[in-house]
């Protein structure tokens, strides 16, 4: 198939966000499909060097090319600036690709436009990486926003409980199908010896969806005293109150620096002993079943993960390699369990990634539904 894929690499030019789109592109290509990346959000790019939204898209377009070119995709992308200008491949080249494309995949609002060339593609799907936030926004949204989602043939979400009795999140007339972020396993395999740190990469608060939900800070404060209760060391690559966290015994690093490029983000994960991950309050409170693409990468690297339960435990194994917690006692028990037989948990982490998140497992299921 020919697949036009919309993502947000330039909108959020950091390693974790980039890997989300990149692993779709690489996974689809490995299955024999022809892929093309488009970014068409109508927004300015974020320039982390200047720490501003930039009308000149040069940082974002250079970033896209640097991310895709090493994988042979340097000529397979186009970025549409807020002013309508095309960068990378031209507007005519995008239209020619789309003219006989079979599938349009929109990840996380990689395009907020329904241009004629997108509409004419026979199969169109949206993949929601912010479950609960997305559905709550739709429930209170203006008509144009609702209409945007109505024009897709299928809607997918990383929230495995969305639309089920397990979660109170309203879905209205929409049907959301469960999927996971696909992981290209070979890109995460490593022989690197881990440091003795449980780590994570996180943003304390986000700007988007501020009117419909709660952020990670609301959950993290419940566990802020964790370092004082265990000899295990932690390091958070965080965009947030680093001084406060250090007062409570957390080692910190600048999340933007750690995530500057896909290789730097991957190296941080591969050098970690395990992940300690807290979820956004809205994911937890609404039992959305959200599971982090970041956690999948830890598992794929053979790094165990101890992550907050959002309801994902109804859909994924928990106890070896991947462990859930909901309170301080469970978090402490999980740390002890991982440390008591680290090699076993590392092995199980990799096995879980292969069984549940491998692009060769996730993408054929997605495509089967997407092209019905």
Image: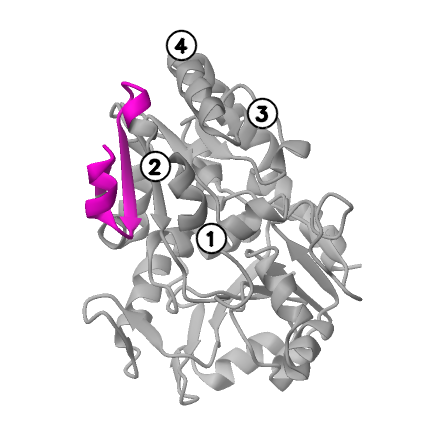
N-terminal of the two: label 2 or label 4? 2
Q: Circle 3 is placed at which residue position?
A: 318
Task: Give residue 332's quadrant in the image.
Answer: top left
> How far apart are the two marked residues, 1 and 3, measured between alpha carbons?
23 Å
Q: Nearer the viewer, residue 176 or 171?
A: 171
- Secondary structure, mark 4, is helix
Local crowd size for mark 2, using a 10 Å CA cut-off: few (<14), some (14–19), many (≥20): some
Mark 1 crowdedness (10 Å alpha carbons): few <14, some 14-19, many ≥20: many
Residue 224: give its label: 2
Q: CA distance from mark 2 to mark 1?
A: 29 Å
Magenta stretch holds residue 234:
yes
- In this view, the mark in front (1 or 4): 4
Residue 20's disc is 1
Q: Nearer the viewer, residue 64 or 33?
A: 64
Magenta region, residue range: 228-252
From this view, report whether residue 219 is shown above or below residue 144: above
Q: Is residue 65 left or right of residue 30?
A: left
For label 3, the SS is: loop
197 w.r.t. 119: above or below: above
Locate the N terminus and report the quarter of the image it occupies. bottom right
Residue 342 percent coordinates (x, y): 39, 15
Reading the image, the residue beneath label 4 is: 340
Foreground disc of the pair 2, 1: 2
Give the answer, above or below, for where 116 lies relative to 266: below
Of circles 1 and 3, the one toward us is 3
Q: Nearer the viewer, mark 3 or mark 2?
A: 2
């Amino acid at each position: 198939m020919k697949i036009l894929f919309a993502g947000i690499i330039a909108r959020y030019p950091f390693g974790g966000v980039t890997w989300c789109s990149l692993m779709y592109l690489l996974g689809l290509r490995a299955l024999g499909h022809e892929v093309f990346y488009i970014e068409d959000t109508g927004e300015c790019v974020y320039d982390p060097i200047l720490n501003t939204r930039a009308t000149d898209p040069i940082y974002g377009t250079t970033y896209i090319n640097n991310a895709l070119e090493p994988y042979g995709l340097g000529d397979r992308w186009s970025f549409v600036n807020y002013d309508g200008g095309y960068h990378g491949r031209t507007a005519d080249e995008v239209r020619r690709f789309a003219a006989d494309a079979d599938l349009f995949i929109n990840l996380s609002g990689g395009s907020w436009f329904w241009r004629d060339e997108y509409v004419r593609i026979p199969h169109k799907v949206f993949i929601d990486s912010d479950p609960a936030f997305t559905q709550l926004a739709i429930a209170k949204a203006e008509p144009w926003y609702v209409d945007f989602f109505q024009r897709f043939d299928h809607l997918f979400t990383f929230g495995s409980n969305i639309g089920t009795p397990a979660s109170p999140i309203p879905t209205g007339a929409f049907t959301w199908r469960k999927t996971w972020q696909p992981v290209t396993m070979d890109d995460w395999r490593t022989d690197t010896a881990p440091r003795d740190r449980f780590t994570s990469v996180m943003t304390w608060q986000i700007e988007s969806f501020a009117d419909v939900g709660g952020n990670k800070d609301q959950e993290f404060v419940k566990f802020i005293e964790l370092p004082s209760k265990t000899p295990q060391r932690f390091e958070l690559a965080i965009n947030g109150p680093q001084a406060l966290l250090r007062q409570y015994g957390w080692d910190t690093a600048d999340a933007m620096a750690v995530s500057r490029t896909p290789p730097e983000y991957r190296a941080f994960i591969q050098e970690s002993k395990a992940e300690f991950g807290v979820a956004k309050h809205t994911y937890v409170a609404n039992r959305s079943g959200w599971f982090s693409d970041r956690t999948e990468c830890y598992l794929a690297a053979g790094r165990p993960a101890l992550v907050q339960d959002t309801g994902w435990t109804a859909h994924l194994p928990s106890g070896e390699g991947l462990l859930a917690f909901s309170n301080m006692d469970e978090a402490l028990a999980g740390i002890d369990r991982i440390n008591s037989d680290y090699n076993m948990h590392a092995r199980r982490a990799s096995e879980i990634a292969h069984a549940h998140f491998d692009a060769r497992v996730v993408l054929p299921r997605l495509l089967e539904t997407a092209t019905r």
